Image (cartoon, grey):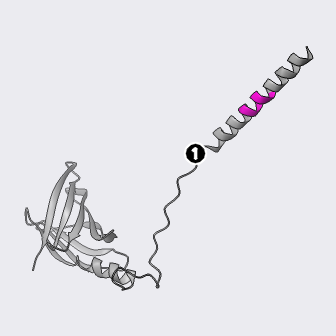
Amino acid sequence: MPTSTRRLGTIGLDTLVLVLAAGLLASCGEPAPPSAPPATAPSRGAVGAKGAPAAATTQADLQRVKGRWQRQDGGYVLEIRAVRDDGELDASYLNPRPIRVFKAEASQDGAAVRVFVELRDVNYPGSTYDLRYDAKSDALSGIYFQAVEKQKFDVTFVRIP
């Protein structure tokens, strides 16, 4: 009898340890994914690919989208008058009359310059342009989301001389 009692006690202790370990692991859950570092401006010491300060290179690249752009499939005109240091654009959109630009911004997306424009006006309740600047063709190309019909279209804007 003493052997079986000790044996049950050992099995009971092993089981208890396993149950406690399982409970501890379950209470930990999965580790949270690492959060992305906050977007910050490059330090003054940062250097771009050509030896120029990284911030100056990015800002110069963003400035390339300034100008008047006409969509190839119609009379739609996107005018970008200024690019602020934070990437916000001073922009207007005409079809052929002005359509309210709610938000317009340029950003560096790897080696590409991205232009995002959101329209909010009659018949344009959140329609957007998500465009990329192509230096070789001097064009803005991407996707137009037509919010009323919930449709997406491939579009290209060419610079108006």
The quarter of the displayed image where residue 3 is located: top right
Q: Residue 23: x and y, percent?
A: 69, 36
The magenta stretch is: 13-18
- Which residue corresponds to the image point at 39% horizontal and 84% vertical from the top-left? 53
Indicate the position of residue 67 as horizontal and vertical percent values.
18, 78
Report the side of 73 relative to 124 (left or right): left
19 relative position to 88: left or right:
right
Crowding at mark 1 (Cα within 10 Å: few <14, some 14-19, many 20+) = few
- Residue shown at the point (45%, 70%) measured from the top left: 39
**Amino acid marked by disc 1:** Glu
Residue 99, percent from left and from top:
19, 66
Residue found at the far top of this picture: 1
Is 32 above or below relative to 37? above
**Majority secondary structure of magenta residues:** helix
Residue at point 29%, 77% (across, down): 62
Q: Quadrant of the N terminus?
A: top right
Give the residue at the far front of this rendering: 3
Residue 138 locus on image (x, y percent): 15, 74
Instruction: Examine the image and state in which quarter residue 41 appears.
Output: bottom left
Residue occupying the point 33% across, 71% down = 108
Q: Is residue 14 magenta?
A: yes
